[in-house]
Image (spheres, rainbow, N blue to C red):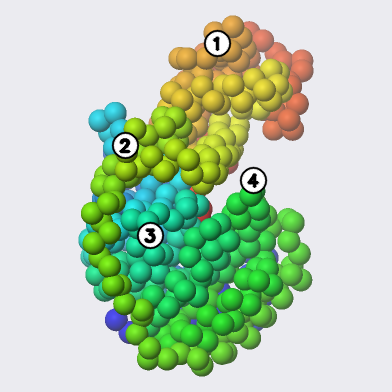
Amino acid sequence: MNIPEQGVGIIYFPGFEDTIELNSDLISTIEIEPQTLWTHNKTELSSYSYDEDKVEYLQALDIPISFHGVGFPIGGSISSDTEHINCMQKMIDALDPVWLSEHLSFNKIYAEDAVRNTNFLLPPLQTMEGALNAAEKIKAYASHFDLPFAFETGTNYLQPQDFELADGHFINEVARNADCNILLDIHNLLSNQKNGRQNIFEALSQIDLSRVIQIHLAGGFYFDGYYLDAHSDVSSAEVLEVFEKVVRMLPNLKAITFEMLADYLPAVSQDDLRKQFEIMNSVWAERGKDASDTAAAPLTDKSSDMDAPRLTDYEHELGLLAIRKQKATEVPSLDYLNHDKGVKIIQSLIDKFRKSQLVSFAKLSSRYIMLKYGEEAFEQVFSDYCIKNYPCLFASDSGILFSEYLLNDSDLVENDTFFKDLVTYEYNSLLTYMDGVEREVNISFNPYDIIPSLESRELPKDVSTGNYVIHITPEEDAKEKVNTVFHS
């Protein structure tokens, strides 16, 4: 497919409207992560729906758009569910994206006779088995859409192993076997280098750079000795120096995209953001000037799979370790995972994200625990909840699961009638938000006496008590439509 040039852009999240308007002279394309605008519904008609107001905003911008998926990566052995395809296609019809990309990662494992989500984009097994599997999944996924497809080069916090293909060779084998494009995330590859993996330019020498159609830029920070691809700031001087060299090497580059999470926007000035876009435009003008016809460095040894773990074993064991469902793996070929500090980094990041889902979607219950019983009590409840429950991709699902846990497994609810009624109210509100079905709950207080206090992070005072029948409708549900999925 012929792919037109797009230029410099930004990934859109709600909250970036002012940034886009203030820099409209420097931003010529927008990328969106569709799933961040989705709600996971519990209806018979559709499993997912998107925020129509946000889609109308994007339509009104009247500039080219590309899609970058975050919920259904293509690097794992478990195929993505097809329930989301319909919603994705409807968004494609509405916004007419130039191309679609996804992560070369996995976030699903089989455990306890079901497919479970890890709530984190985990690195694929870097062997020929892993590369051929990813290529197969790319072909299958891309076949659903009449769009050019690219996969994103991912972050890997694990240390390289002797049995692995080098990072660059693995990326190239996936692209070659899938015959697809590459989204080169410079910040990801530089993060990998800084954390002990392959040098970014050595990796690039092993990749067919004619397949690279897009670059991602971002900023990050150090955490417990590891550099995180946090999407937390403008790009550092180090990132920009690498970026300038790489752009000149790429003969078919179509877009350069800056990504930053909206959570960090208050800490970054508009002046710094504008400077980021100015630099990106300046470097964009140099694209392909040092491109050569030199072929990617050949892969000379494809026999390393003989000493490698099986793909399904790797995914299962790393997945269970990542979500703390097991303390160690007993698979001999994967013993290295028991000693890799990168696993602990992944565990910490998953914990942080799971917690953010709860405090954003089971907001009333979470705040009540922290305000009445303290942060330590909340940590204990959270830890027990995580041990007993698997992660969910969407925060709305996590909120419902947490409410069910509190009602059925928590001593706090058993010993605090007020809290039990609060959880009951919030649980039914979440269900109504999800399925649109009206509900009635019998509780001992008027919820409108307590919601303002808890939203202000204060315990409620002077609460009217009695026998209240609360009628919950979708229109009355005051929940924020938080439908977060993990960003890597």
Please name the residue shown 54% across and 37% down the image: 351
- Spatial CA span between label 2 and label 4: 27 Å
Quarter of the figure with residue 479: top right
- Residue 375 appears left or right of 343: right
Quarter of the figure with residue 281: bottom right
Which residue position holds label 1?
A: 411
Please name the residue shown 58% across and 61% down the image: 194
Quarter of the figure with residue 325: top left
Comes first in the chain, label 2 or label 4: 4
- Cβ atoms at labels 2 and 4 below 8 Å apart: no
User: Which is in the foreground here, disc 2 or disc 4?
Assistant: 2
Res. 104 mark: 3
Comes first in the chain, label 3 or label 1: 3
Characterize the local packing of mark 4: few (<14), some (14-19) or many (20 or more) Cα atoms within 10 angstroms. few
User: Which is in the foreground here, disc 2 or disc 3?
Assistant: 2
- Spatial CA span between label 1 and label 2: 37 Å
| Amino acid type indicated by mark 4 | Asp
Res. 331 mark: 2
- Spatial CA span between label 4 and label 3: 25 Å
Residue 473 vertical position relative to residue 15 in the rendered view, above or below:
above
Q: Nearer the viewer, residue 475 or 146?
A: 146
Residue 294 place in picture, x, y as percent: 38, 88
Comes first in the chain, label 4 or label 3: 3
Characterize the local packing of mark 3: few (<14), some (14-19) or many (20 or more) Cα atoms within 10 angstroms. many
Res. 224 mark: 4
Quadrant (top left, top right, bottom left, bottom right) of the N terminus = bottom left
Please name the residue shown 53% across and 58% down the image: 196
